[in-house]
Image (tube, grey):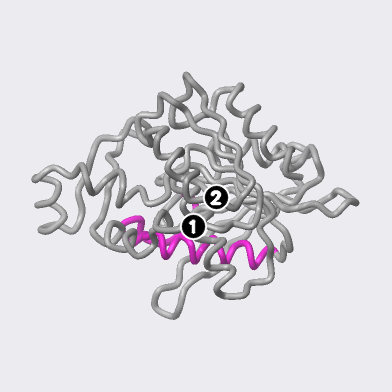
């Protein structure tokens, strides 16, 4: 193991009430900077995990700057327990809140990719509602997909997909990122409706930087423009990458992500 990897702390935390517990795998990088700075929290996308390129690069940025970094896998993802098909925005938000609380971080910058952008906004709302003892000091949202089940999936369902949802409780579609198909469950879609954030003004209380590819086939860049309309009270920067795809994992895209984080710390 390298010197950097030796500083990582891996542990699992149990989330959820009796009968619905999930063992959530986490990797924490302890703070080493003598100056108090926010911790970085990675919030991954649908079917992604904490070992992805952007998550690792965020962790390396934290190592270089002596910051605490928090990565984890949602239930049904990566190294965490639980069934993927039971996953919903509510459950994954609950897990994110539990992981951040368990880290004891007082100030955090949430770095959310795709669905992680939705989770980030719900984390802010729920932490405020529950009075949790941490402050969100910034948001870096990469191809954010808030309300994607409502805005990007439901309006485009085919009759066959609607029938599959009704009869089997899920439908499948080919994935560009995995040999296994994407699975979208009725529970995810119904829960998505109750977790919508693009329904009125969102007050994050922190600076927001959105990175969005204009050649994103999964989350159209107009969705990022729509998100901005609901953030009128915040300091929001939108960076449109003309030739950027959904992943935004090229070296130049990673540099943009790190610059956005650096501006907030």
Q: Secondary structure at mark 2?
A: loop
| Quadrant assignment for the N terminus | top right
Depth check: 249 or 128 in front?
128
User: Which one is earlier in the sequence, the residue at label 1 or at label 2?
Assistant: 1
Q: x%, y% of residue 96? A: 54, 60
Q: Is residue 96 magenta?
A: yes
Q: Secondary structure at mark 1?
A: loop
Residue shown at 41% from the left, 46% from the top: 46
Range of magenta residues: 78-103
Q: x%, y% of residue 117? A: 50, 48
Residue corresponding to mark 1:
201
Residue shown at 9% from the left, 45% from the top: 160
Q: Is residue 35 above or below residue 223?
A: below
| Left or right, 30 with reference to 33 | left
| Left or right, 113 with reference to 168 | right
Q: Are marks 1 and 2 in contact (CB under 8 Å)?
A: yes
Crowd rating for badge 1 (residues with CA inside 10 Å; few <14, some 14–19, many 20+): some
| Quadrant assignment for the C terminus | top right
Q: x%, y% of residue 129? A: 55, 73
Q: Is residue 175 above or below residue 110?
A: above
Q: Is residue 264 above or below residue 215?
A: below
Please identify the dominant SS of the magenta region: helix
Q: Residue furthest bottom?
A: 18
Residue corresponding to mark 2:
232
Residue shown at 62% from the left, 75% from the top: 131
């Amino acid at each position: 193991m390298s010197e950097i990897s030796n500083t990582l702390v891996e542990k699992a935390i149990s989330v959820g009430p009796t009968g619905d517990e999930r063992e959530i795998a986490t990797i924490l990088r302890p703070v080493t900077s003598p100056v108090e700075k926010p911790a970085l929290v990675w919030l991954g996308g649908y079917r992604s995990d904490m070992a992805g390129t952007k998550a690792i690069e965020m962790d390396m940025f934290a190592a270089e700057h002596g910051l605490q970094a928090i990565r984890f896998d949602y239930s049904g993802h990566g190294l965490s327990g639980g069934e993927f098909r039971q996953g919903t925005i509510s459950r994954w938000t609950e897990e994110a809140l539990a992981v951040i609380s368990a880290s004891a971080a007082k100030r955090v910058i949430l770095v959310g990719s795709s669905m992680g952008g939705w989770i980030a906004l719900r984390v802010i709302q729920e932490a405020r509602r529950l009075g949790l003892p941490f402050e969100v000091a910034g948001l870096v949202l990469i191809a954010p997909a808030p309300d994607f089940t409502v805005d990007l999936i439901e309006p485009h369902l085919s009759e066959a997909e609607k029938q599959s949802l009704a009869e089997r409780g899920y439908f499948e579609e080919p994935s560009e990122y995995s040999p296994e198909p994407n699975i979208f469950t009725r529970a995810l879609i119904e829960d998505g409706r109750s977790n919508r954030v693009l329904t009125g003004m969102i007050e994050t209380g922190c600076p927001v930087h959105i990175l969005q590819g204009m050649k994103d086939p999964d989350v159209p860049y107009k969705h990022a423009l729509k998100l901005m309309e609901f953030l009128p009270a915040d300091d929001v920067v939108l960076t449109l990458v003309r030739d950027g795809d959904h992943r935004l994992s090229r070296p130049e895209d990673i540099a943009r992500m790190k610059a956005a984080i650096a501006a907030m710390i």
